[in-house]
Image (cartoon, grey):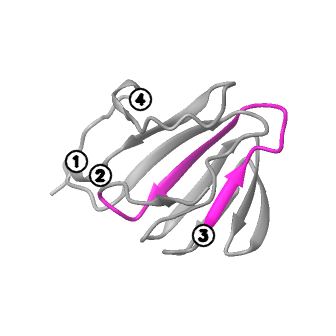
Amino acid sequence: MAESKLVRGSDLQSLGIRVSEEGGGVRYLEGARHGLSTSIYEGEVAPGSGPGAHTHPYVEFAVVCAGRASFVVGGKTFEAESGDVVIIPAGELHDFSNPGDTMLKLIAIHEAPVHAGSHLS
């Protein structure tokens, strides 16, 4: 069972995903380590970059915190900006990139206690 606690940003785990030579990356809070059924990801994506097409066996909610993002989810394109939320169904092939000229910052909520996914590109 989850308990009240503060997890510092500096304590988030790195996924070791580097999305471009210009910097950025992904850190996350693995829900299972805290008795949770969801996990939270913090991503920074440099202009012109993105993680590549991939899937997850669970629902993902992507919240754009700063900058702009172009998402392709199941063949549909969504242009998202700060404050927007993109809902990605379980098993749906998806990708996103930063079409802007500033760093894209986003938070992704995955309905899973641990990371699972398959990169296809």
Q: Residue furthest front?
A: 121
Looking at the image, which residue is at 56% across and 34% down?
18
Q: Amino acid at mark 1?
A: His
Q: Which residue is mark 4?
A: 9
Magenta stretch?
93-113
Q: Earlier in the sequence, mark 1 or mark 4?
A: 4
Q: Quadrant of residue 86?
A: bottom right
Q: Secondary structure at mark 4?
A: helix
- Mark 1 vs mark 3, foreground winner is 3
- CA separation, marks 1 and 3? 28 Å
Looking at the image, which residue is at 77% across and 35% down?
47
Viewed as shown, does residue 76 lie left or right of 58? right
Viewed as shown, does residue 110 lie left or right of 20? left
Count neighbours of disc 3 (C-alpha within 10 A) and say few if under 14, some if 14 to 19, many if 20 or more: some
- Asked if disc 1 and disc 2 are in contact, CB closer than 8 Å, the reply is yes
Q: Which residue is mark 3?
A: 93
Viewed as shown, does residue 35 lie left or right of 19? left
